[in-house]
Structure formats: C-alpha cells, structure tokens
Amino acid sequence: MSPHPDQQYFDALCRGDQRLIREIYSKFSRGVLNWVQQNNGEAEDAQDLFQDALMAIYDRYCGRNDFQMTSSFGALLMTICRRKWYDRLAQKKREETVRNAESARYEEETPEWEAASEAILHQQRQECLSKVFTLLSEQCQKLLAMVTAGELSIDNIASALGLANANAVYQSKHRCTARWRQLFYDHFKGETHG
Amino acid sequence: MDNSERIDRYLSGEMNAAERQGFESELASDAQLADDLALQRDMVHFLQQRESKSALQTQLKAIGADYFQSEPTARIVRLSPRRLIGIASAVAAAAVILLLLWQFWSAPSLYDEFAQHPPLALAEKSAGAINWSETETAFQAGNFAKAESGLETYIIQHPDDRQARLYLGICKMELNKTAEAQLIFQGFSDAETSLKDLADWYSALNYLKIGDEVSCRKALNALTPASSYFDRAQLLLKRLDESKE
C-alpha cells in the first residue's frame, strides 16, 4: 500500500526538510491565523501556537514506531492548535471568548481530537522530562547522554567520566535513570490536570 | 532487580524468548511496570531527539516569521471634540466620493484572492556557484519577470527539478503568458502526488485568470478529496457560484 500523501509532512519535520516545512506553513498557516484572530488572539499567538503544534507532532511521531495516522496532517495540526488555544484561554479564564466552545465539545468525539490529545500528552511528557533532566547531576546528564548516543564504547565512557570500569557505568546509569524517573513522577503528576 | 535494568534489557532485545514472554505477561498485570516502560521509552526518545528537536525549533522560528506577520499597530492620538467633528465630516465626504468611484473599480478578483503562491526555495537545493536567493526574493516579492529569468537559468542547470519548472509556470501565469503556463502545468500528470496536486490547482487558476470559467470549473472538479488542494478547489467553486448570484 502506498503511503498517505501527507506522510511526507510528518517525515519532513523529523529531518528538518526546509522546503516541505515551508510548504506546511504555506498551506496551513492562514487557516490557523484566521481562526486564532477570530478567537481573541493575535498573529504572534498564532505563530507561537503553530510552532508549538508542529513540535507536538514531532514529539508524537519522530523516532517512534507506534504512531497510527488517523487523519490528514492539516486536520491534526489544526486540532492541536485549537486544543492548545482552548487550554491557553482557559488558563487565562477567557474561555467565554472562544466563539466555538460548543463545537469544541463535538470535536472531542473525532479521531483528530484523540490524536491531538495524544500528541499533546507526549509533548507534555517530553517537556517535563527535559525540565527534570536539568535537576540531575552533571555526571548523570553526561553519562546518560553518552550511553544513549552510543558513539563511545562503555570502557571509553568509564574512562571519560572517571569511573572504574564498565560495570560502574551500568550501575551509575541505572541509578541516574531511577533518579530521573522519580523526578519525572514527582513533577508530572503535579503539573497535569488529569 | 530494578525495573530500569529489566526494561533496558527488554528494549535492547537482550532478553531470551522465555524471559521476554514472562516480562510481557507481567506488563499486562503490573500497571507500574507498564508506566515505567512507557517512561523509559520516552527517556530514550528525549535523549536521542533533543539535539534535532532543538535545531527544528530554531528552524521553525525563522520560517514562521515569514508567514505570521502582524499588522503595524496604530498610534493613538487624542483629538479635541471640535477637531473630531471636522475630521468626521471630511471622512464622510471622502467616503461618499469613494463610494461613487467604487462603481468604476472592480473588487479584488477571485484570481487575486486565490493565487497565493507558496514561497520558492532554490538556494537550499543547489550547491552550485550561483546564489539563487535573488530569484527566490524576486518571486516572493512578486517580481515575476526577474524570477522567470532566474528560473529559466536554474532549469537549464537543473533540468530534473520539476518543482522549479512548476514555479516557472506560476511566473508565466502571473506575466499573462498563460498559454505557456498551461503547457507547463499540464506536464505533471506523472509527477509525485504533491507536485501533481499543485500543478492541477495552478492549471485551474490559470483558466480562472484568462476568464475561461468552464475549463476552470472542469479542472477544479477533477481535484479529488485526496488532493491537498481539494478544500481550496471546493471553496473556489463555491465563490464562482456566489459570483453569479
């Protein structure tokens, strides 16, 4: 089966394809801009929202193999923008200004809404992981990055980080991962609203 | 054994079949283990993607600036009531004159409304000595004569770049060389889907430009829902219908 034509846009984000990313902006930015401006937002809000939504798609799709395409790229992008904008307005207690608040409830039934929610959740998890990663010791951050990159042998990593041997690297890695995981659970539960 | 060590072994495929099966059965009944597995996958994803993600963010910020430009904000000047009345009278008089003149002016055409061209990108595709950014800038600025000339040179050097050829068609269309443009747009029937969709859409716009509404409608109706331009085609068809009412 040939891939959906929109597959190219998902792939373009992963590899930073300048031409296709420009095509994404060219095709979809106007719709988002108009919608945001109709819902109490400015061009700057729309630009920020659009970029944020593309990053949510990146977090959900790039480097993962469990993504099922259930809607067109444009529909998913627009739905993520809408969801994020509803959330931002709600945070500012301006939800009454969203003209299409009623239609938002209908959207909750659609596959796009579900896919958008999933992408946003992945993005929130990545943002939280990023935040708590900085709370790890410098040694832990370096070690996890070096082991994941896989560019150096474990012995070389041990030597670079002043650890006794490969076994010490593995032990440190598991200790750092456990610490990172605990920090994530502590912060993520506190940050989400369910 | 700590979960992270087992999960590591599971994710890296180091478990034998029996161990793997046991781990997967445990996953089904142990919600904490399943959460830890999902999180460890996210951790690996974070570490592997953070550099390219950061590069993408920078890239998007630069590109976004070209597409979301806010209108310049007006400066608020306080005026006296007398002055306001004077200005209001002048504005009203000007409005009447403009209204009369409007009879002789046409509203922006449907063509102008729908002919919004995606930006041209040549420079990043070419490693040659010529800097193609001038051609890109000319196209983006609506200087289609200069862009046409640049694209013709580019195509001589890059005869396989079909996208550049399509943009040459757009330049010709804008320069009212519509017959040449139509020939170009019709040469994409065997192209990859995204390019073919774009060429079909421009073929319809080219007909719209020369006032051949029948051919324009025919070309628009030929765009299927799978086409990226289907929604725009439907909107244009609707606007064509409305213009008759």
Image (cartoon, rainbow, N blue to C red):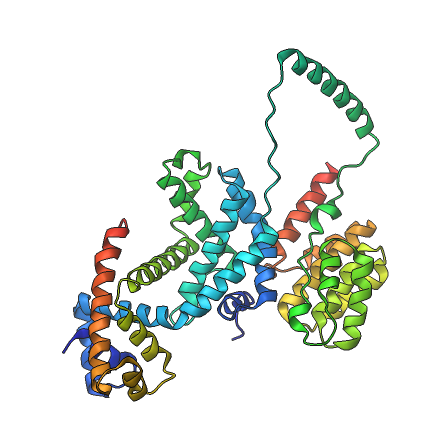
Against B243, residue B80 (above or below) is: above
Against B99, residue A69 (above or below) is: below
Q: Residue furthest front?
A: A162
Q: Residue at x 40, y 33 (%)?
A: A96
Against B231, residue A138 (above or below) is: below
Whether residue B89 appears in this view of the structure is: yes
| Most foreground residue, A132 or B207 | A132
Position of the N terminus of chain B by quadrant: bottom left
Against B136, residue B22 (above or below) is: below
Q: Residue at x 59, y 27 (%)?
A: B76
Q: Residue furthest top?
A: B82
Q: Is residue A171 left or right of residue B127?
A: left
Q: Is residue A60 left or right of residue B115?
A: left
| Most foreground residue, A192 or B90 | B90
Q: Residue furthest left?
A: B1
Q: Residue at x 69, y 52 (%)?
A: B116
Query: Where residue B216 appears, x then y in whole percent?
Result: 75, 54
Residue A104 lies in what quarter of the image?
A: top left
Whether residue B212 appears in this view of the structure is: no
